[in-house]
Image (cartoon, helix red, strand yellow):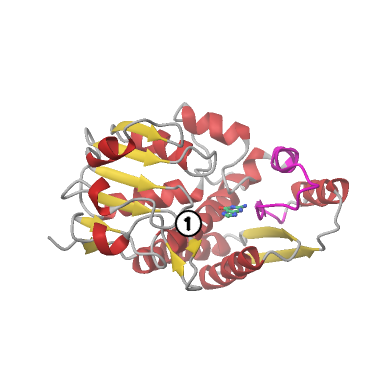
Amino acid sequence: MQAKLIDGKALAAQVKAEAAAETAALKKQGITPCLAVILVGEDPASQVYVRGKARDCGECGIESRVIRLPESTTQQELLALVGQLAADRAVNGILVQLPLPGHIDEKAVIDAIPPEKDVDGFSPVNVGRMQVGEPCYLPCTPAGCVRMIESTGVDIDGKHAVVIGRSNIVGKPAAILLLEKNATVTICHSHTKNLQEICRSADILVAAVGRQGFVTGDMVKPGAVVIDVGINRGPDGKLHGDVDFDAAVDKAAYITPVPGGVGPMTRAMLMKNTVQAAARQNGLA
Ligand code: GUN
């Protein structure tokens, strides 16, 4: 069987159209959603991501403020800027692009973003609210993964979902969101025994490892939904996922491509969170 592609670009366009419509409605009430993005240093991948986020804001009618700071920026200077944006009523969402240079404590910076402006969903308050199922900002990548799975029409309820990777940004929250949808969830990581066997029993397989081709064809259950979160620059200079796509596409029922899969969806979910932040901060949601 040849898997159907889950088209992240097309789905992201749909999500952004929703965000644009919501933005237009807010503007009629005199509210323009605004996202501030801080980029410290010259990391080439981060520069591409930040440009993409600004472009998405433009498409949705959201105001974007991109603040580029030199690599030499001190933690104190960065915290002062976050504090300034936190106090600025015109700014609804604050995103500090990760990774930060080694001399800056990421945790201290994330903690400085007020939870109500934390549109990345990284702050401990939002993580805690997600865990107990309270209204919060969902982290964009896992929320995008769930939306992609739902777009297939496959019911998550009761399925075995296997998440490979346990990062705070993707693996852990993806597992929580799938659990919230009544999946039976297994989280695998570098210490997991029988990884192949566990993956082979997955109706839904989410790969968030960061290693090209980590998921081989024989780890995919026939008919599975495969979500590839990996973005790895290969020796060929091209972008590759964590899944051996050519092998998995013959086994899975649905699979996301890389590029054009999870990446565009992550950015689209950020737009939704920003619009939601603007509405909430103005007492409208
Ligand atoms: N770096 C890579 N992905 C992300 C993301 O989703 N948010 C932030 N802030 N930085 C990132």
Looking at the picture, does residue 180 appear above or below residue 20? above
Q: Quadrant of residue 169?
A: top right
Residue at the location (72% across, 58% down)?
Answer: 38
Answer whether residue 248 is visible to the viewer in this image.
yes
Q: Identify the residue at horizontal 53%, vertical 55% (top origin).
A: 270
Q: Which residue is mark 1?
A: 266
- Ligand 1 is within 8 Å of the C-beta of the residue at disc 1: yes
State the image coordinates of residue 115 (x, y, percent, origin top left).
64, 39
Is 172 colored magenta in this rendering?
no
| Residue drawn at the location 55% of the way across and 34% of the way down | 127
Residue 180 makes an appearance in the image: no
Kind of residue indicated by mark 1: Thr
The quarter of the picture where the N terminus appears is bottom left
Q: Give the magenta part as a residue range.
A: 90-112
Q: Position of residue 59 (x, y in %)?
A: 52, 72
Which residue occupies the foreground of this view, 263 or 10?
263
Q: Is residue 191 left or right of residue 26?
A: left
Instruction: Please provide percent x and percent y for residue 154.
Output: 20, 48
